[in-house]
């Protein structure tokens, strides 16, 4: 049985991790319906098509939901971030965890390297 060449090579998560390691923030774009999605997947969540590619994201986003987590080491922020392109992801917003507000504009920064990480900063601090 022949394999579909669209599924050859590294999977979508490996592609996303490789882009992060190079300091790039990308999301998936469906060439069939135009939807943007995160996290990366083999098929489009909107139309179930398989014509997906990684595209650079604008890096602009808004805090959709936020909470402050407190432990012995101190407090830190955990937020759901809605990217300008539509998808949402869980991440931290830098700065005072108590100052993060729903609807707040944020921008992305990728800390690349061996263990890449996506961090957001308040847009007015960028």
Image (cartoon, rainbow, N blue to C red):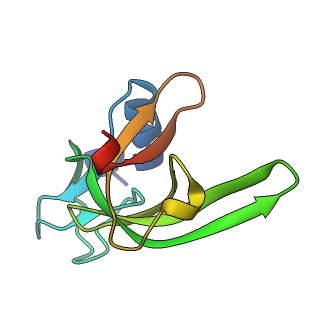
- Point out residue 7 in the picture as x, y percentages from the top left corner: 35, 48
Closer to us: 102 or 98 = 98
Closer to us: 68 or 57 = 68
Q: Residue at x 34, y 50 (%)?
A: 3
Q: Residue at x 12, y 59 (%)?
A: 31
Q: Residue at x 88, y 53 (%)?
A: 72
Closer to us: 37 or 88 = 88
Q: Residue at x 27, y 45 (%)?
A: 5
Q: Could you tell me which quadrant the C terminus lies in?
A: top left
Closer to us: 19 or 44 = 19
- Quadrant in the rendering for residue 81: bottom left
Q: Could you tell me which quadrant the N terminus lies in?
A: bottom left
- Point out residue 82 in the picture as x, y percentages from the top left corner: 33, 66
Q: Is residue 53 left or right of residue 82?
A: left
Q: Is residue 50 visible?
A: yes
Q: Is residue 59 left or right of residue 64?
A: left
Taking 87 as reference, is 57 above or below it? above
């Amino acid at each position: 049985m022949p394999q579909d060449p669209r599924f050859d090579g590294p999977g979508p998560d490996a592609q996303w991790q490789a882009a992060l390691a190079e300091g790039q923030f990308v999301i998936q774009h469906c060439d069939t319906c135009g939807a943007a999605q995160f996290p990366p997947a083999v098929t489009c969540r909107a139309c179930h098509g398989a014509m997906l590619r990684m595209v650079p994201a604008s890096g602009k986003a808004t805090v959709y939901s936020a909470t402050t987590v407190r432990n012995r080491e101190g407090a830190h922020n955990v937020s759901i971030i809605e990217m300008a392109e539509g998808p949402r992801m869980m991440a931290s917003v830098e700065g005072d965890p108590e100052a993060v507000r729903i609807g707040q504009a944020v921008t992305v920064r990728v800390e690349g390297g061996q263990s890449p990480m996506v961090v957001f900063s308040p847009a007015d601090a960028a």
